[in-house]
Image: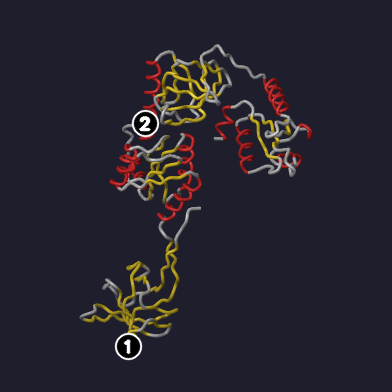
Amino acid sequence: MRARGANVTDIVVLVVAADDGVMPQTIEAIQHAKAANAPIIVAVNKIDKPDANPLKVVNELLQYEVIAESLGGDTQIIEVSAKNRTNLDGLIDAILVQAEMMDLKADPERSSEGVVIEAKLDKGRGPVATVLVKRGTLRRGDIVVAGSAWGKVRALLNERNEQLTEAGPSVPVEILGLNEAPSPGEPLAVVESEARARELTEYRDRVKREKATGGINQVSLVDMMSKLQSKKVSELPVLIKADVQGSAEAIVGSLEKMGNEEVRARTVYSGAGGITESDVQLAKSAGAPILGFNVRASKQARDLAEREGVEIRYYSIIYDLLDDMKGVLSGMLAPLQRETFLGNAAVLQVFDISKTGKIAGCRVSEGVVRKGAKVRIIRDDVVVLELGTLTTLKRFKDEVNEVPSGQECGMHFQGFQDIKAGDYIECFTVEEIKRTLD
């Protein structure tokens, strides 16, 4: 969200608390602003607090190449108190000076363009998109296209929920009337007719579908081999519903980064709005749980989920959701098998006992051999039994639990009869270690 904000704005106002100083989110915002080549004005807030230290903020910002004008840099640093409204005029003046230097202008008469900042499904109002107008003037009644969404602007609302008839350059507005909630970051443009809007959105839908399915008729032996290889990856299918598109997008992005070459989460579907019966049906067919972020399921969806055995999990903190999914994915990782060497033995002679089968008469050459331990049998430097079990261990006629180096014993291996004189036996234990995702 910070990256998107930095990309759509002309000037970044970085608000830093005078008592806290530079925090991790401040550093992230600086990085995004620099990546977008947007100039920064720093507002050092909360200067009314007794432990405020604006100088500390100025010095901390030096580490991130944000240098105040007072230190010979080009960044304006303004000390303000939002609570007491101290020096807010000074901040406005700083923004106007920066805008004048950059010669920021927009033509309000041309065809309108903007960017979708956020989108959601409102129960009473339908799809609602928050849009920042960049060029031209957006008016009520305009036909607009944003990604694969389109519609006629039924209403324009400002940040105070007041109805507007038009919105000029730099004005943020909520628009009603789209057929679906567009993805955040999509450019929004006014088009001349409904036919043109449909044509554009149908084309974009088709491109999106082809990208999702990897194109049509793209089947080759190489593709088939790579698909077979990819079956080694354990996938956790999930269906995500959130209150706004931006949250759904953030969750999907975080889950994609979470996996490794063995396990990964696969998003079956993600969208904004409450959990519906069609979501439950889709989750059932995909064998996926539904993760709801700041949303709830309707009674019909809850009843259907109970009948179909679909799990619905609710979250209000994104980190709780990600920690849960990390735990599930960690549980899907195959445990590490750690071998601990016990001993070696050489087969001197093989005896055929009528009820038991073949018994190997052996001499322990190194370490110990232990009843119930795992064995590997080697013949002429080739492994003939990889993970056998030593089920019977005898010393003369007595059953024993272990035999040390230098002594002779009789061995029988579970389900393995092809033992021969001259074979070499490695004895070891196997410990399973649970793994976690880093």
- Foreground residue, 170 or 48? 48
Specify few, some or many for label 2: CA neighbours under 10 Å numbering under 14, 14-19, or 20 or more.
few
Q: Which residue has dot 1 on it?
A: 396
Instruction: Locate residue 96, reporting x and y percent.
Output: 69, 22
Residue 93 spot, x, y in % from top left = 72, 24
In this view, 400 is above or below 44? below
Q: In the figure, is residue 100 to the left or right of 421?
A: right
Identify which amino acid the numbered label 1 is placed on.
Answer: Phe
Colour mode? Answer: secondary structure
- Please tell me in which quadrant of the rendered image residue 28 appears: top right
Quadrant where the image shows the N terminus: top right
Distance between mark 2 and mark 1 Cα atoms: 73 Å
Give the number of the disc on residue 338.
Answer: none
Q: Looking at the image, is mark 2 or mark 1 earlier in the sequence?
A: 2
- Residue at far left of view: 354
Q: Position of residue 177 (x, y in %)?
A: 42, 22
- Tell me the number on the disc at residue 209: 2
> Label 1's element?
loop
Q: How many marks?
A: 2
Relative to 129, residue 336 above or below: below
Which residue occupies 24% across, 77% down? Answer: 357
Which SS class for mark 2?
Answer: helix
Q: Position of residue 338 (x, y in %)?
A: 44, 65
Q: Residue at x 64, y 39 (%)?
A: 26
Q: Is residue 302 above or below residue 36?
A: below
Front-most of residues 174 and 151: 174
